[in-house]
Amino acid sequence: MIKTENLKLNNTNKKILDDYQYELKMVKHKEENTTINSYAEDIYKYLEYIESKHINNALNIKYENILDYLKYLDNNNYEISSIARKITSIKSFHKYLSETNNIEDVSLKINIPKFYRKLPNILTIEEVDNLLDINLKSPFDYRNKAMLELMYSSGLRVSELINLKLSDIDLDNNYVRCFGKGNKERIVPIGEVAIEYLKIYINEYRDSMKKGYYTENIFLNNHGKNITRQGFFLIIKQIAKEKDINKNITPHMLRHSFATHLLNNGADLRTIQEMLGHANLSTTQVYTNVSTDILKENYELYKRRD
C-alpha cells in the first residue's frame, strides 16, 4: 500500500484513497505489492489531475471529468496499454465509491474497447524498410526479399506463406490466394514491390534451387525442398541481426506491423479483418494498434452516448 501523507492531494481525497486501499487489501484480498500498489498509483495520479481541475472531492467527479482525463492521457502520448490499465483502475475505484457512498457510478459508460488490449510488439515503418533493404547477391537473397515483401505486403501468416504454390499467385492481377485457419480460403492483394521481386525470384532463380526435384511450392530451401517455419524464423532473425534491429523479432511481427500500419494510415478495421482472414472483428481489434485519431473518435463516441 502506498502512504498518502506526502502525496499532493487534499486531506479529503487522501482519506478516500486510504480507505480504498484498505478495501482492496482487507475486503477484495488483493496482493499488496502488485494490484493494490498499481491501482493506488493510478488513482493517485487520477485524483491529482482531478484536483487540478478544481474538483476537491472524489465523490463529486462527473462522467465528463473522466473523459477529460482520458483525453489528457492521450494528448500526453501514454501507451494504449497504459491507458487501458488506468481505465480499469478508474472503473474499480468508482464502483467502490458508488457502493460505499450510495452514489451513482459515473464510470459505467466508460468501456475498454477490445482494441485497447496489450498487443505484441511491432516494427516501425523505418524498421520494416531497413529489414526489407536486403543486399541482393544470391538466389537466396532474392528468395528472402520476395518472402518478406510478400508477407509485409499482404499480411500473411507464416504457415500461409511457406505453403504457397505457384498456382496460388497471380502476378498479372496482383493477388495471392491463401488458406488460413480451418483451411478457409481468402484472396489478398499484393503490393507492387512484392510483385516485382516475386517475378524476379520465380522467373530467374527458383528453378535453379529445385535441385532436380519437382515441386509446386514457391519458396524453397537450400536442399530444393519446401522451406519450413523454423527455416523462415532463422532467416528473419539473421537479417534483423545484420540490420541491427534490436527487437526480439518474429515472423508474426510482420503481420502485426502490416495491420497496424494500414490502420494508422486510414484503413478501416473491416477491410483489415478481411485481409488478415479473421473470423471475428474483435480478433482484428486485438491484433492491431489504434492511432491517436481513432482514440479521439472513440472519446467522441462516448460523448454522443452520454
Image (tube, rainbow, N blue to C red):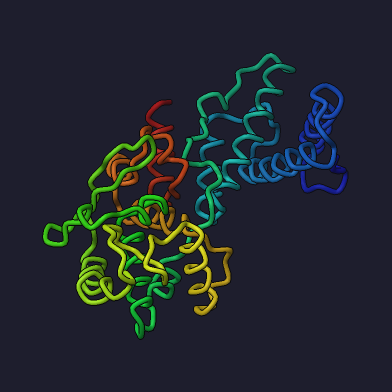
Tell me the residue at 61%/43% (across/down): 53
Instruction: State the residue in front, 146 or 7.
Output: 146
Q: How many marks?
A: 0
Q: Can residue 136 be seen in this view?
A: yes
297 to the left or right of 201: right
42 to the left or right of 289: right
Name the image quarter holding residue 25.
top right
The x, y position of residue 113, in whole percent, is 48, 35
Residue lying at the far bottom in this picture: please name it.
137
The x, y position of residue 206, in whole percent, is 28, 71
Q: Is residue 4 visible?
A: no
Residue lying at the far left in this picture: please name it.
172
Residue lying at the far front in this picture: please name it.
212
The x, y position of residue 247, in whole percent, is 57, 66
| Quarter of the figure with the C terminus | top left
Q: Please tell me whether residue 265 is drawn above or below residue 53 in the rendered image.
A: below
288 to the left or right of 23: left
Q: Please tell me whether residue 175 is drawn above or below residue 31 in the rendered image.
A: below
Tell me the residue at 47%/41% (across/down): 286
Name the image quarter holding residue 199.
bottom left
Name the image quarter holding residue 31.
top right
Instruction: State the residue in front, 4 or 113.
Output: 113
Q: Please tell me whether residue 216 is drawn above or below residue 304 in the rendered image.
A: below
